[in-house]
Image: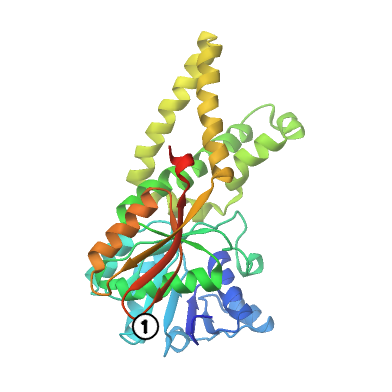
């Protein structure tokens, strides 16, 4: 690992539990806390180091991952900040970033809090569903202020080396717009598809014939309902804006069906097929980015541009003269 590091995980559902299990797998010194005593008991039964007191769990840690439900984050952030030293790096895993970034700024924590979001959720929930390999190859957004450039560099190295994640630097506002289309609206569409079947008089017959397209299209409707509601309401404006864009495309497709316009349908589905192909078939070029240690704003601006071009980071190190990031960007022939 990058160095001996003391970590705490606060909240041990699917994401927090998977962070905890991965850290244990690499023999990191890691403590955990969960508000549910039954989960703490189960965690200890599985050989995990759970504390009964939140302050005790985070005391003397180098980094704390805040992984509780989105609505609890402001209060938890404030409590953990008081219980940790000024050098302790704080990060979260919530699905929206603008609100928590503003909360951290209001609490004077912008120099050590780095908003984060691993794009590795599933419809499963809880510590029992946790997987130490959940983040391998997954995108992990980080949205730091320039004042937190040191913690950002540390987390980029940690997430790349320990979790094998693809670090994607973004501003909080850009993150929220992007995940509205890549994650949150798909939850609405899955809920609409499964919800339509739920009220259909053909419900049982539909389910008897449902195959891959229905299973894939409705998969995230199995996510715990409270978690989905928190996510959608936490990013309401961006979700509604992106939903309007998706609705316009859906109306266009419906119009082509109504008009019997095969050419229009073929054109639109060919474009959609290309996007789907890029999801799994994109190729990358390796890149190395070097920055002077004292140019945080320019450094973050360049890294955000890399992410906007579809790139990501895989690591960060210091040498005698500079900060050096390893990463990848889409191959030129894929970008056009």
Quadrant showing the C terminus? top left
**144 or 313: nearer the eye?**
313
Image point (27%, 66%), residue name: 145
Q: Secondary structure at mark 1?
A: loop
Image point (35%, 75%), residue name: 151
Residue 76 shows in this picture? no
| Place of residue 251 in the rendered image (x, y in percent of width and height, measured from the top left) | 45, 22
Which residue position is annotated with label 1? 88
Q: How many marks?
A: 1
| Place of residue 272 in the rendered image (x, y in percent of width and height, measured from the top left) | 52, 31
Image point (69%, 27%), residue name: 202
Q: Dot 1: within a 10 Å radius of its alpha carbon, few (fewer than 14), some, or many (20 or more) residues?
A: many
As drawn, is 210 to the left or to the right of 302? right
Residue 177 shows in this picture? yes
Q: Quadrant of residue 17?
A: bottom right
As drawn, is 127 to the left or to the right of 35? right
């Amino acid at each position: 690992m990058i160095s001996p590091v003391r970590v705490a995980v606060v909240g041990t559902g699917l994401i927090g539990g998977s962070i905890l299990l991965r850290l244990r797998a690499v023999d990191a010194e890691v403590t955990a806390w969960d508000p549910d005593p039954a989960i703490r008991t189960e965690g200890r039964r599985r050989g995990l180091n759970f504390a009964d007191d939140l302050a005790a769990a985070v005391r003397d840690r180098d980094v704390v991952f805040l992984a509780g439900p989105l609505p609890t984050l402001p209060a938890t952030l404030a409590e953990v900040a008081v219980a940790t030293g000024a050098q302790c790096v704080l990060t979260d895993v919530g699905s929206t970033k603008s609100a928590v970034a503003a909360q951290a700024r209001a609490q004077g924590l912008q120099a050590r809090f780095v908003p984060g979001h691993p794009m590795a959720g599933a419809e499963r929930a809880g510590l029992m569903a946790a997987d130490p390999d959940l983040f391998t190859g997954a995108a992990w957004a980080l949205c730091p202020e320039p004042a937190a450039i040191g913690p950002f560099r540390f987390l980029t190295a940690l997430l790349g080396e320990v979790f094998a994640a693809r670090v994607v630097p973004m501003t909080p506002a850009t993150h929220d717009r992007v995940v509205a289309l890549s994650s949150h609206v798909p939850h609405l569409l899955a809920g609409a598809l499964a919800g339509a079947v739920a009220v259909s008089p053909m419900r049982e017959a539909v389910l008897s014939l449902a195959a891959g397209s229905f299973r894939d299209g409705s998969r995230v409707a199995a996510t715990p309902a409270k978690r989905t509601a928190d996510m959608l309401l936490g990013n309401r404006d961006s979700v509604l804006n992106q939903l309007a864009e998706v609705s316009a495309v859906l109306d266009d497709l419906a119009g082509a069906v109504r008009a019997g316009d095969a050419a229009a349908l073929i054109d639109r589905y060919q474009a959609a097929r290309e996007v789907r192909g890029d999801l799994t078939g994109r190729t990358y070029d390796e890149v190395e980015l070097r920055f002077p240690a004292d140019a945080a704003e320019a450094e973050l601006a360049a890294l955000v541009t890399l992410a906007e071009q579809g790139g990501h980071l895989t690591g960060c190190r210091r040498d005698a003269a500079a900060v050096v990031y390893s990463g990848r960007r889409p191959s030129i022939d894929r970008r056009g």
